[in-house]
Image (spheres, rainbow, N blue to C red):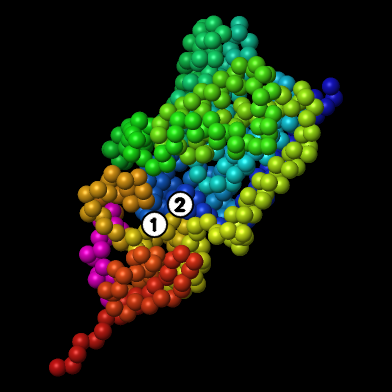
Amino acid sequence: MEAERRPPWRELALLALWLFATLAWRPLLLPDEGRYAGVAYEMLHGDALVPTLDGLPFFHKPPLLYWLDMAAMRVFGAGDFAARFGPALLGWMLGAALFLHLRRCHGERVARIGLAVLATSPLFFLGAQYVNHDIGVAACIGAALLALARALEDPARTERRWLVAGWALCGLGVLAKGLIGIVLPALVIGPWLLAQGRWRQMLGLLHPLGIAAFALVALPWMVLMQSRYPGFYDYFIVEQHFRRFADADFNNHQPLWFFWVVLPLFMLPWTLWLVPALRERVGLYLWWIVAITGFFSLPSSKLVGYVLPAAAPLAALLALALARRGAPVKAVAAGSGLFCLALVLALAWKSPPWKPPPSDRDVGTALAAHWRPGDRLVFADDAFYDLRFTAHITAPVIVLSDWDDPDLPKHDNWKKELFDAGRFAPDGGRSVLWNWSRLPELACGGRTWIAARPAALARLAALPGLETVFEGRSARLLLEDGRCPKPAAK
């Protein structure tokens, strides 16, 4: 029993080392990592409360990830490590919450195995190394459910401090990725209590202190945004939640069974013990997996990271099965960990056995070497999300495209993101979102740098004096010197 009382700092420190040591091994990937790191960088040098994309209000997602990355950029500087600091910290939070819960409820050995399963599962490890919002909502939902489960352990009473903590963590979940921060915990904890006939405790979850804690965490930012931007509620709540959930026009269409395959596949090799794990009969963990996976299976748009909130309960079930059967946990953890590291190395800048993933770091580095105060930057028919972040350029960029295309709002892509953002700041939108008809205005206006893919070069040929300064793997950096030719002498 002495081992049971040993402080857990060693395991939690090892988890931190495992997650943070590899953050800067590879460039930011496009589009997600470049986009979200860029938003945090803009907020660091602008309004810390309003997420902005190219200087325009960007309300696709709430600000928790951006706030964490802003803090990291202020401490460590704007680089790949700081950009991934928020996801890694939130991943550590989820791992720590699971470890402490398993340690208290099932003992030291199960807790260590559960932490090993979670930490070395590709789904979790890559999710905690990737700049987007999925690991944040997984961490907040996971910690909230474990806190609420602890508050409800005794059917005769509810521990108020853990109830308040659970509600506050649900509020953080809303700030991580929106309303699912409260919807998913309710979907898990409510039916679980009802199935046991504990309806009084389910009503007890609605304690005013808990609701107040949730409101104090989740609502101030949304109320402030609505006061500044009157269409915020309709866009952030109705369009980005209800319409997106129900609409079949968004990208990433996948079949109904997609997540039921993805979850065990991306938690290999541990899910080789899935069948005995499902026999453990720990109702909360099993229902947690079913509720989360079933919920995200309903809409047609699906991404792998959406199922991350189901990783922790699956790790708990697997840990119980592995501990009961005396499986070779250390050997499997070592092999799975090496596989995760190999995946990260395969995505590194100079790695390929195959072609490197999308990144414009080479163009951004070249631009940083040539940039002068007073220069301006133009993106030709593409977002180039990571370029400004790499070059450390804070000023908004002119984006040339067909912004008057009537079909533009119908497509779920980078153009619609900027178009929607421009709705909240029409003057700002007009200043940075240029139609191709305005191309001649770039001449005679001082030094102008243009980032362009090969497909856009033909349309840029109308600019006089345009020269290629750098040719990268997937884009070119062009310079329009802005010196108008002298008029001919009469």
Mark 1 burial class by Cα count in 10 Å: few <14, some 14-19, many 20+: many
Residue 78 against residue 421 in the figure, above or below: below
Q: Is residue 439 magenta?
A: yes
- Quadrant for the C terminus in the image: bottom left
Please tell me which residue is depicted at 60% across the width and 57% down the height of the picture.
348
Give the extent of the magenta segment: 429-445
Q: Main secondary structure of the magenta part?
A: helix
Residue situated furthest right in the rendering: 2
Position of residue 323 in the picture relative to residue 285 (left or right): right
From the image, tell me which residue sits under label 1: 383
Q: Is residue 324 magenta?
A: no
Image position, residue 484 (x, y; %) = 27, 81
Position of residue 16 in the picture relative to residue 196 (left or right): right
Name the one closer to the observer, 162 or 196: 196
Mark 2 burial class by Cα count in 10 Å: few <14, some 14-19, many 20+: some
Please tell me which residue is depicted at 55% across the width and 38% down the height of the picture.
135
From the image, tell me which residue sits under label 2: 31
Kind of residue sitting beneath label 1: Ala
Image position, residue 315 (x, y; %) = 65, 30
Determine contact: label 1, label 2, CB under 8 Å: yes
Residue 305's disc is none
Q: Secondary structure at mark 1?
A: loop
Image position, residue 353 (x, y; %) = 62, 59
